[in-house]
Amino acid sequence: MPDLREIWHYRELLATLAGRDLKLRYKQTALGLIWAVFPPLVAAAIFTYIRGFLQLETPGNAPSILFVLAGFVGFTVFRDTLDRSGQSLLTNQHLVSKIYFPRLLLPLAATLSVLFDHAIMLGLVAVVWMACGLIFASNPDVLTPVPGLHLLMWPVVTLLSVMLASGFGMVVAALSSHFRDFKHVVPVALQLLLYASPVFYDLSLPLSRDDGWVILLNPLSGLIAAYRWSLTGIGMVHWPAFAASAAVAIVVFVVGSILFRRVEGRLADVI
């Protein structure tokens, strides 16, 4: 297992790496932090249109745009954490080959930068939520949910999503140091995973079919449904699926940490 005391000793370097990642991503951009909210907003609008075209009902007659946006934000925190942490060694190979520091800091710093973007997207959700409350205030067919005790579950679901993504990210980072194919495979896999997860549809839709249990093989299914419900109160929590996803997240995080630790000593020679 990683040496947590060593990680704590290098905590200032961890913060520096995370801050540098943020500065490089938004440096010399005309719109700056707007790029953190523009993609999920556009994607939510497109998926909302598709839902309307397919005449999909929203649980609780909630606004469709809020339903889709909450699901997409939950998927985005997983996608970006896995993608950035998985590429962290390759993008910082000049540091890995020159100086010593716990290499685990690189995927952890990438995760911290993702959480910063995630905080901005939560602000977007709040704005859309309030806008829906104003727009549909006089429409009895659309019921805008109100914040409640379900928000207490949101940090737990977010932590599990980050753990699952970080675990896979550490595995990808460790394998990418030997096989560069992963930098091409991971984006494609994440794109396919978007449609295999209940992002723009409710989990009850596939579960209403006889073969709907297949979607539960995706550990993100239980997490995204729980994320949407914990943040907005829309939809449902499939507790067996959520429990299974939580167990998978913990196991993947532990296995990813151990695998990364095993290859850490050889990274400077092979990267």
Image: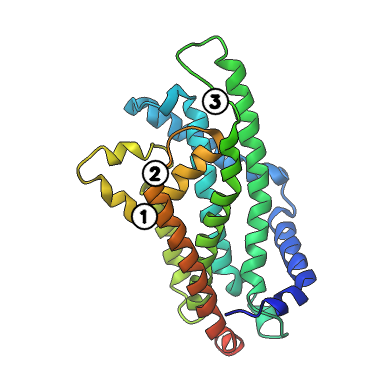
Q: Quadrant of residue 232?
A: top right
Does the image show residue 221?
A: no
Badge nearest the viewer, 2 or 1: 2
Which disc number belongs to residue 169? none
Q: Is residue 11 left or right of residue 226?
A: right
Q: Which sits in the foreground, 31 or 88? A: 88
**Residue holding disc 3:** 145
Choose the circle earlier in sequence order: 2 or 1: 1
Quadrant that contains the N terminus: bottom right
Q: Residue at x 64, y 67 (%)?
A: 108
**Residue holding disc 1:** 218
**Residue holding disc 2:** 238
Above/below status of 109 relative to 78: below
Q: Give amino acid for label 1.
A: Asn
Q: Position of residue 85 (x, y in %)?
A: 58, 66
Q: Residue at x 56, y 58 (%)?
A: 162
Secondary structure beneath label 3: loop
Q: Give amino acid for label 2.
A: His
Choose the circle earlier in sequence order: 3 or 1: 3
Mark 3: give few (<14), some (14-19) or many (20+) Cα within 10 Å.
some
Above/below status of 180 relative to 23: below
Alpha carbons under labels 2 and 1: distance apart: 13 Å
Q: Position of residue 39 (x, y in %)?
A: 56, 42
Choose the circle earlier in sequence order: 2 or 3: 3
Quadrant that contains the C terminus: bottom right
Above/below status of 209 relative to 244: above
Secondary structure beneath label 1: loop
Q: Which sits in the foreground, 253 or 184? A: 253
Q: Residue at x 45, y 30 (%)?
A: 48
Q: Position of residue 47 (x, y in %)?
A: 44, 35
